[in-house]
Image (cartoon, grey):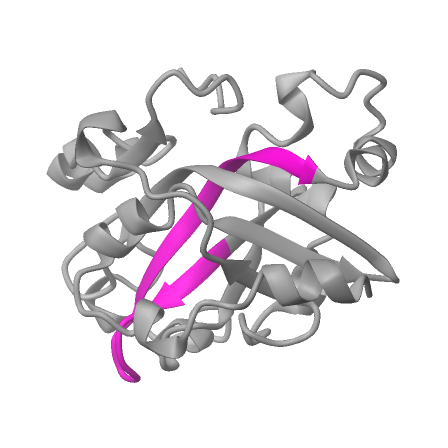
C-alpha cells in the first residue's frame, strides 16, 4: 500500500457509524471517500449518492420490523461493518451498517466520483473512457469498480480492505433529497425522501 496515501486517508471512527439517525448518517457520508485495497489494488472514490434504510420501521428495508435472516443478520451488528448482497442475483450492492448493536439500519452507497487508480476501475468495469459516469454511477457499478464482492459481507470499515475517510463537507443546501430507487413495493415508505445526492455532481446515477 502507498504509505503516503494511507496516512492521508485515515478511517472514520466507529462513533461516526453508531449514531441513531440513519438519515443523518446517509447525508454525512456524502463527500467522504470510499477506499478499497483489494488484490493489491488501492482505489478511492468520493461518495456522491446514498440511500438510508431503517430496519425497525421502514418497509423498504430488508430487516423491516427487525426481521433476522441469514442475509440480514449483519445489519444487527454495531455500526461500521459492510452489508453486501446480490440484487437479482447479478449486481453486488454495498451498504454501510449504522446505529448500535441490535438495530438494523444501513446506508446504501449508490454512486461515487473516482479519485485514485481510475485505470483499475475501468479494467474491472470494461469501460474505455475515464470520464464515463457509468464507471461508478449506480450501486452495482460502484461495487464492481471498487472490487467489492459478497465475500466482503461483514467486513469492518476501518480495516485493511475497505474503509471510509473524511474528505469534503457537503452543506445541506447542496444535497438533493428524493425518494429511493426500486422500492415501489414498500407502500407509503417508498415515498420517503431518503435518497441523497450532491447537487450538480455528474457521477450520480441516472435512476428513473
Please give the range of residues in magenta: 95-115
Query: In the shown orientation, is residue 18 left or right of residue 92?
Result: left
The residue that appears at 84% across and 40% down in the rendered structure is: 120
Q: Position of residue 62 (x, y in %)?
A: 36, 58
The answer to whether residue 89 shows anywhere in this view is no
Quadrant the N terminus occupies: bottom right
User: What is the quadrant of residue 170 in the picture?
Assistant: top left
User: What is the quadrant of residue 144 in the picture?
Assistant: top right
Asked whether 105 falls inside the magenta stretch, the response is yes
Please name whichever residue, 185 or 195, is drawn nearer the observer in this view of the structure.
195
Q: Position of residue 110 (x, y in %)?
A: 48, 38
The answer to whether residue 60 shows anywhere in this view is yes
The residue that appears at 28% across and 56% down in the rendered structure is: 25
Q: Is residue 86 above or below residue 56?
A: above
Query: In the shown orientation, is residue 23 left or right of residue 202?
Result: left
Quadrant the C terminus occupies: top left
Q: Position of residue 140 (x, y in %)?
A: 61, 39
Q: Position of residue 112 (x, y in %)?
A: 54, 36
Asked whether 27 falls inside the magenta stretch, the response is no
The residue that appears at 77% across and 67% down in the rendered structure is: 3
Please name whichever residue, 138 or 43, is drawn nearer the observer in this view of the structure.
43
The residue that appears at 55% across and 67% down in the rendered structure is: 10
Instruction: Tell me the chief SS of the magenta region.
Output: strand
Amino acid at each position: 500500500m502507498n504509505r503516503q496515501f494511507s496516512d492521508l486517508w485515515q478511517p472514520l471512527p466507529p462513533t461516526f457509524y453508531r449514531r441513531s439517525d440513519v438519515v443523518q448518517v446517509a447525508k454525512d457520508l456524502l463527500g467522504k471517500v470510499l477506499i478499497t485495497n483489494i488484490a493489491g489494488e488501492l482505489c478511492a472514490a468520493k461518495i456522491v449518492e446514498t440511500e438510508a434504510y431503517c430496519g425497525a420501521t421502514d418497509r423498504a428495508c430488508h430487516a423491516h420490523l427487525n426481521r433476522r435472516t441469514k442475509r440480514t443478520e449483519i445489519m444487527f451488528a454495531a455500526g461500521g461493518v459492510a452489508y453486501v448482497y446480490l440484487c437479482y442475483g447479478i449486481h453486488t450492492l454495498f451498504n454501510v451498517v449504522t446505529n448500535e448493536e441490535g438495530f438494523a439500519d444501513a446506508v446504501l452507497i449508490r454512486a461515487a466520483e473516482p479519485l485514485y487508480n481510475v485505470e483499475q476501475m475501468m479494467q474491472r468495469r470494461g469501460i474505455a473512457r475515464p470520464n464515463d459516469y457509468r464507471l461508478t454511477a449506480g450501486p452495482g457499478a460502484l461495487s464492481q469498480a471498487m472490487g467489492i464482492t459478497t465475500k466482503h459481507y461483514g467486513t469492518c470499515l476501518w480495516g485493511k480492505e475497505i474503509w471510509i475517510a473524511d474528505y469534503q463537507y457537503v452543506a445541506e443546501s447542496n444535497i438533493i433529497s428524493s425518494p429511493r430507487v426500486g422500492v415501489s413495493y414498500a407502500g407509503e415508505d417508498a415515498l420517503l425522501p431518503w435518497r441523497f445526492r450532491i447537487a450538480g455532481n455528474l457521477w450520480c446515477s441516472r435512476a428513473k
